[in-house]
Amino acid sequence: MSTISYKSFNAENLKFTTPEENKTIPDITKYQLMSWPRYLKDGREIIPQIQGPWMTLNTYGIPGKNDKSGQPLKNQAGQPLTDRERGKLKIPFNLSDPDSQKLYQVLKEIDKKCEEEKEQIWGDKKKANVYKYQPLVRQPAENPDADENAPQKPDYVTIKFDFDSKTSEIKTKVYQNVDGERTEVATPTLDDVSKYVRYKCEYRPVFALAKLFGAKAAGDDGKRKYGLGLKLKHIEVKPSSVSAQDDNDNAFVDDDDDEKVERRVLVKESKVEETQNTKDEAEDGEDEDEKSPVNESVAVAAKEEDDEKEKPTPKARRGRGTRTTNV
């Protein structure tokens, strides 16, 4: 893969092929057809990774384990949510910030291209009419119980964490940046990641356009969803000024139920291993919000700063890992 700054990413350079069955390993495409987006760079096609800007996590974030009453959230089988089921980062857009707005525009341009090339993707108009595009940039659902004077939730994009298909440990690399010094920290579980990626932290993501998918089953509207799956490959974080919350402390919850700088390249180019990519995507099952746990809460979410007095900032935990300078 090759990393491209959000500042220079051009959606016109994206190339799509028709999602299809995996004939070698049929189980991989049991629930959805898949293909891999390509990006034309320097005369050759690559699987693209986008490096986003520095942003502040003022709302949304990583889904929590418990509901608002402190009870464990369950999946459709009645079991506690696994890391893979919770393993996504919901990123808010701050349209008053030029950098966040630029990333927003890039993703909107990608959405536009996917919709405009719908017939080209599926081969003809008849097949295309079966599908409805699921955009990357989404609007929060309205909350009928919210106060009419409550601030409006921002638009967002959801990016999934990368997991090892055998061990289920997180493969997404997390770097802590303290005073300009970047250090990779060990984060095999989502709880480990949440120590760094939390409310009010500054962060910079690197994510891949990991797949173009087409659902095999129709939704309630009679249409099959198609869209792009994003995978979080790297994330660099500056410590939050807000103290970490205990797992049972639901100070930050998500009210809406919307689930029904100079450029420094963080990663080096690596060899594309499509077979492993395919297996990893198959592990995710249906994409994004198609099947979501009930009563989802978010551990890192919006909160007015004067709602609760902030606790003293703890000393940053460095974690175990390899210090990096040019990654």
Image (spheres, rainbow, N blue to C red):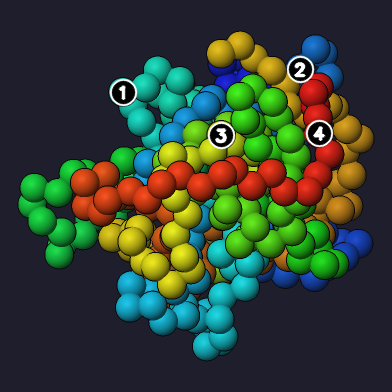
Mark 4 in CB contact with mark 2 (< 8 angstroms)? no
- What is the C-alpha distance between the residues marked 4 and 2? 30 Å
Taking 44 as reference, is 33 left or right?
A: left
Give the quadrant of the N terminus.
Answer: top right
Residue type at the position of mark 2: Lys
Q: Earlier in the sequence, mark 2 or mark 3?
A: 2
Mark 2 in CB contact with mark 3 (< 8 angstroms)? no
Mark 4 in CB contact with mark 1 (< 8 angstroms)? no
- What is the C-alpha distance between the residues marked 1 and 3? 21 Å
The residue lying toward the viewer, choosing from 206 and 189, is: 189
Disc marking residue 96:
1
- What is the C-alpha distance between the residues marked 2 and 1? 31 Å
- Quarter of the image holding residue 191? bottom right
According to the picture, the residue beneath numbered tag 2 turns out to be 41
- Residue 149: give x, y in percent of width and height: 8, 47
Residue at 56% across, 75% down: 81
- What is the C-alpha distance between the residues marked 2 and 3? 31 Å
Residue type at the position of mark 3: Lys
Disc marking residue 238:
3
According to the picture, the residue beneath numbered tag 4 turns out to be 323
Taking 117 as reference, is 42 left or right?
A: right
Mark 2 in CB contact with mark 1 (< 8 angstroms)? no
Q: Earlier in the sequence, mark 2 or mark 1?
A: 2
- Label 1: how many Cα within 10 Å (few below 14, some 14–19, many 20+): few
Tag 1's secondary structure?
loop
